[in-house]
Structure formats: structure tokens, C-alpha cells
Image (tube, rainbow, N blue to C red):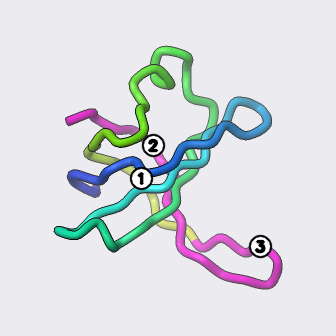
Amino acid sequence: RFNALKLSKLKELKGGHLKLSFQSGSDQSEKIDALYFSPTENRKKDIIEGSEYDILGELQINYFNRNQTIQLLLKDFKPL
């Protein structure tokens, strides 16, 4: 569980999936990317750049172009 993360970037991918970037910390300097697979249209309406959320998700390692990064597989969220 991750509390009070600010959504800084939102991109819709093929298949209706979402790629999101969140920031945290007192100066918003900490960043984590997230994937949200197959959200309903109602849930998509609740996702607004610049808003803060409590997030439930699973940390994963993303392997892409020989790079490894940590990302969050978003399971659920609550707008604050």
C-alpha cells in the first residue's frame, strides 16, 4: 500500500491499459511508474493528473531494452 501519491503523468496504451507516473515525498522528488490493466470506464474517470491517491499494488521489475526498472502493478486506488 502506498499513501498520498500524486499522479504526474497518464498515458493510455493499446487495449485500454494505463501507464501512470506517481510522485511522492515532501518535495515530490521520488517517482514510481505504474501499470493499470483493463480499468473500467468509471475507474478511468477517477484518474486525473495532478490529483493524489492512496494506491494498492504489487511491485515488479520491468525488463525493457536491457534495462531494469521498478514498477507498480496497480490493483486499486482511492482518490484523496
Residue that mark 1 sits on: 57
Residue 64 got which mark? 3
The amino acid on which the numbered mark 3 sits, given as a three-letter code, is Phe
The amino acid on which the numbered mark 1 sits, given as a three-letter code, is Gly
Residue 51 versus residue 3 in the image, above or below: above
- Residue 9 among magenta residues: no
**Residue 54: percent from the left, percent from the top?**
26, 45
Q: Residue at x 35, y 72 (%)?
A: 30
Residue 75 got which mark? 2
- Residue 63 among magenta residues: yes
Chain-order first, disc 1 or disc 3: 1
Point out the frontmost of discs 1 and 3.
3
The amino acid on which the numbered mark 2 sits, given as a three-letter code, is Lys
Q: Residue at x 77, y 32 (%)?
A: 15
Point out the frontmost of discs 2 and 3.
3
Query: In this rendering, would 6 be left or right of 20?
Result: left
- Magenta range is 61-80
Query: In this rendering, would 2 be left or right of 68?
Result: left
Q: Residue at x 55, y 43 (%)?
A: 10
